[in-house]
Amino acid sequence: SPAAFTVGERAFFARLQFSIGTVAGTDDCAFGFRKAEAYQTNIDDYDEMACLNVITGDIKIETILNNGATTTTDTTNNWADGETHTLEVHVAKSGAVTYKIDGAAPTTVAAFSFDVGEVVIPFFFFLHATAAQAGAVTLKELEAGAL
């Protein structure tokens, strides 16, 4: 993949600006990095992942290391119906991951590092809570690259 990054070669980031019409309709609305592997229909089935995940308006940090269980941390930041926000995930050369919401660190953070040598790709994963709560999710701007 031209968007793949190898942890340990250099620092890199991904940034996505988008809006959510009805946040109650988001069961998973995740953006970040995951291991370059086959697509999984359940976000919790990836081998490695670090993302910001909007779940019914709560912005959470979710991570998976070495096919372990998903660790979830509530940032205490929230997303309301119709709002547009920018989510960023940065990975240091060491593998340490940091997060930004609208250019600032979340209120609550969680420490996580990818393994050096891991090949990761930026991703967006969306799952409706119910079809009746769909609401529009509008992707506005995506950027990924070296830091």
Image (cartoon, rainbow, N blue to C red):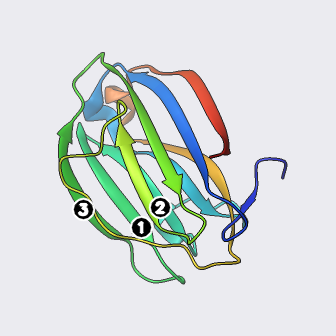
Q: Residue furthest right?
A: 2
In this picture, residue 88 sits left or right of residue 106: right
User: In percent of the image, x 33 and y 27: which residue is there?
Assistant: 132
Image position, residue 70 (x, y; %): 38, 72
For label 3, the SS is: strand
Q: Residue beneath label 2, please?
A: 50
Residue 93 falls in which quadrant of the image?
bottom right
> Are there few (<14), some (14-19), or many (20+) residues within 10 Å of tag 2?
many
Rendered position, 57 above or below 120: above
Q: Residue beneath label 3, please?
A: 73
Which amino acid type is marked by label 2?
A: Ala
Which amino acid type is marked by label 3?
A: Thr
Q: Do the residues labelled 3 and 1 touch (CB within 8 Å)?
A: no
User: In percent of the image, x 45 and y 54: which residue is there?
Assistant: 51
Residue 68 falls in which quadrant of the image?
bottom left
Residue 52 visible here: yes
In-front residue for pair 10/97:
10
Q: Residue beneath label 1, please?
A: 63
In this picture, residue 103 sits left or right of residue 92: left
Q: Which is more N-terminal, label 2 or label 1?
A: 2
Q: Which is more N-terminal, label 1 or label 3?
A: 1
Image position, residue 39 (x, y; %): 68, 59
Q: Do the residues labelled 1 and 2 touch (CB within 8 Å)?
A: yes
Image position, residue 86 (x, y; %): 42, 29
> Are there few (<14), some (14-19), or many (20+) residues within 10 Å of tag 1?
many
In this picture, residue 19 sits left or right of residue 104: right
In-front residue for pair 100/123:
100
For label 2, the SS is: strand
User: In percent of the image, x 76 and y 48: which residue is there?
Assistant: 3
